[in-house]
Amino acid sequence: MDTHNHDQNQSANGGKAVQQPASNGSDDAWQAFMAEHEDDLNDVNNSRAAKKFNRKAQQNERKATKRARKQMMLSVNELSNSNFVGGKPAGPRDFTGSSWLDTDDVMDRHGSPFVPPNPDLSGVNRGRAALWAVLVAGIALILIAVLLPSWAGFIGVLAALCVLVGAGGLVMTHKGHDETKQSWDDDGARV
């Protein structure tokens, strides 16, 4: 049976006699395999697929080293708390004042006479309020006309009337800002 296997090995390798590797180590067996199939391995090594695989492997290796280098650069755990809070005196661009969230405290500290606005709606003219309501209703009707195309003609006419009456009435009742002017060159700006 040994001679049969020997004959098959010779016919598979083009008539060359194949030496069976010694079973004393896997390195010897590997070297024998490499020597035996050197031409085939060189063909595979020089193929397009092998070159493509090598390029992809090198690219992945570069990405992995770049990622590892990035991770090694700086970690938050390596920094002390003084790097984030306190620790150093303020620089020229560091804001050391108070935040706008502390406005009440700052104004109380400096005794500012500021009084927050308290709008009084008791003096609103009822006619003006009604004109504003008609104007807002007209704008709402325009939006409804867009959403309901089958009713757009009727709702559109109604919306146009409401907008014209509301806006026209507000323009007609507007008295101007003459009551707040203090002199002829006063443009109404207040600080």
Image: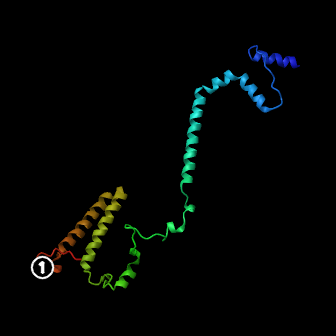
> Percent x, y for residue 183?
12, 79
Q: Is residue 108 above or below residue 9?
A: below
Percent from the top left, x then y, of residue 115? 32, 84
Q: Position of residue 45 (x, y in %)?
A: 63, 27
- Of residue 191 and residue 150, the one placed in the foreground of this image is 191
Which one is in front, 119 or 134? 119
The quarter of the image holding the C terminus is bottom left
Is residue 126 rendered to the left or right of residue 53?
A: left
The x, y position of residue 14, in whole percent, is 74, 14
Q: Residues within 10 Å of mark 1 (few under 14, many from 20)?
A: few
- Give the colour scheme shown: rainbow
Residue underneath mark 1: 183
Farthest-out residue, top:
15
Splitting the image into 4 quarters, where does residue 166 fall? bottom left
Tally of numbered discs = 1
Picture quadrant where residue 122 is located: bottom left
Report the front residue among 126 and 145: 126
Secondary-structure class at tag 1: loop
- Disc 1 residue type? Ser
Using residue 133 as the reference point, say whether residue 40 is left or right of it. right
Q: Residue at x 81, y 32 (%)?
A: 25
Quadrant location, the N terminus: top right
- Position above or below: 146 against 80: above
